[in-house]
Amino acid sequence: MNKNTSSDSVMQAAAAWRTVLGESAVEIEPSALADHGRNAYGSPIRSVAILRPQSESDVQRIVDIAGKYGVPLYPISTGRNWGYGAASPVTEGCAVVDLSQLHKIRVVDAELGIVSLQPGVTQGMLAEFVAQQQLDWMVPVHGGGPTCSILGNALERGYGLTPTTDHFAALTSLRAVLADGSMYESPFHAMGAETLGSAHRWGIGPYVEGLFSQGNFGIVTEATFTLQRRPEHVEAFFIRIRDEAQLGELVDQLPTVLSALGATVAGVNLMNDRRVLSMSRRYPVDQVGPGEIISDALCAKMTKNAGITAWTAAGVIHCPYRMRKSVRRELKRLLPRSLSRPIHMNRWRVHWAKAATRLMPIGQQSIMQQIDSIEALLDLADGIPQRVALPLAYWLRGDAITTKEDLNPAQDNCGLIWYSPLVPMKSADVHQYVAMVERVCAEHGIEPLITLTSLSERLFDSTVPILFRPEQPGATERAQACYEALWKQGEQIGCLPYRLGTLTMSRLFNANLANHASLLQQLKRTFDPKNLISPGRYISIQ
């Protein structure tokens, strides 16, 4: 329990919360708290209560009572950011405020594509709403699946493959409950100009909204988002990269490609062979012992059988239908000549590929899996929620990719910690980074599954899933040590994470950020002098 939170205070606060929220909205049963605290880290953090408000005014009441009894709060949207903490607080002794029951969707302006969302609105909910309302707008999706919160992902600066790659950039205004129970509202909204405030994210004066992104200055209860109009044509392209030399050539040419093609190419993913294997083959559990990884020889055999090259590039094109051929030609012209010709896949080609597989002999399921993966990528590019990244958390089990309706790695005892550093889009930096990840992961018995995603024409974000099996002796310790080593050695070569999980927040406090940390702590003391909201989240507890 938090050193400043007594059990008496928790019980008094719980009684008060039950009075205003109702019995069913307040959970303090130890077994329920333990179950809720699972986080896929292998190190659950126990909360003292789970609170489930139904409205913004409920959130204000929760905050008022928390302040009265000194019980810190930890708000979550849906608690499904697996690998970054799930529903788990940063520190012990917090009452988790589960905002999943706040799930209203409101159209601010249908013509301009502006919607207002509460924290519990998931990708699936918004997709269903857009379809029912017959709106020609895309949902800002990512690979976590239809049950993940849109607002929660945006506040953590998540990204995807739709034209608005940066999801926080689509957030234009917000409402938040502050630590004293009062409300913050973006300035133009407060002045009665809702459409203006929803279309112009900067408002007027200092940009306060940024404090609520990767911060702990309040509980965001509503935000407006600008959605992208659905394009006439969406297709994916794939490039086979045979070795590190070709990878370097592509990396050095990508800034030119992305700059020249602009919004027609939303982003490019570069995936190493092991990462592609994790999407298309079962893990060979009978050939890999605990604390070991797939040997180079076995990896070479598996990739050869699957037709997987050293690296694979996957990108997405959004454009008017009449531009599709010219975009393909320009892409081919801009790419290094040493690379193989891009393979383009659209809905029509996927349809015929599926038809062709039905004529193949039994035992060609892997080809069908690859086609399904391409179709899922096209869905994501089209703003249709898909859980393409979620089965990855289950890979080490060696099971077939599960068809379970509601995958939840935290509750299903998977082990997953995301390491997600930024990497300059330069071949020398990429080669150095890849070598570092491969070395560190191998030293800790972690499969080096590497993806590099273009965030701009200057920068990649790399996502490395640290997969482990918590039930195996020493696996959790190895995984957490692997993250620590990746951070330390990544920092030495100039590659630092763009976001952190609850397990790894303390790494930020140990960094050489004295002036930055001091300013944030001053702001925190002003906004939240009792340190009630999300203590330890991105800002050191003082």
Image: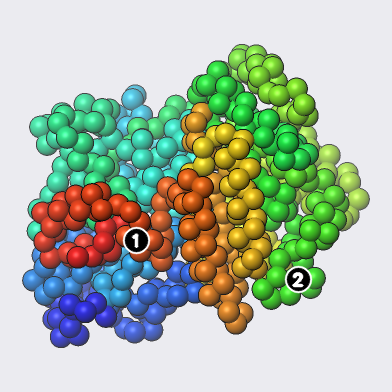
Label 2, on which residue? 288
Q: Position of residue 424 (x, y in %)?
A: 51, 37
Taking the spot 20% from the left edge, 69% from the top edge, the residue there is 72
Taking the spot 50% from the left edge, 69% from the top edge, the residue there is 480
- Calculate the distance from the C-alpha at mark 2 to the C-alpha at mark 1: 36 Å
Three-letter code, disc 1? Asn
Q: Helix or strand or loop: what does disc 2 sit on?
A: loop
Mark 2 or mark 1, which is nearer to you? 1
Q: Nearer the viewer, residue 530 or 138?
A: 530
489 relative position to 56: left or right:
right
Q: Position of residue 513 (x, y in %)?
A: 30, 52
Res 140 seen here:
yes
Q: Nearer the viewer, residue 292 or 377?
A: 292
The circle drawn on residue 278 is: none
Res 56 seen here:
no
Taking the spot 19% from the left edge, 30% from the top edge, the residue there is 203
Label 1, on which residue? 510
| Colouring scheme applied when the structure was drawn | rainbow
Q: Helix or strand or loop: what does disc 1 sit on?
A: loop
Q: Position of residue 232 (x, y in %)?
A: 55, 22
Three-letter code, disc 2? Val
Q: Earlier in the sequence, mark 2 or mark 1?
A: 2
205 relative position to 23: left or right:
left
For the N terminus, which image quadrant? bottom left
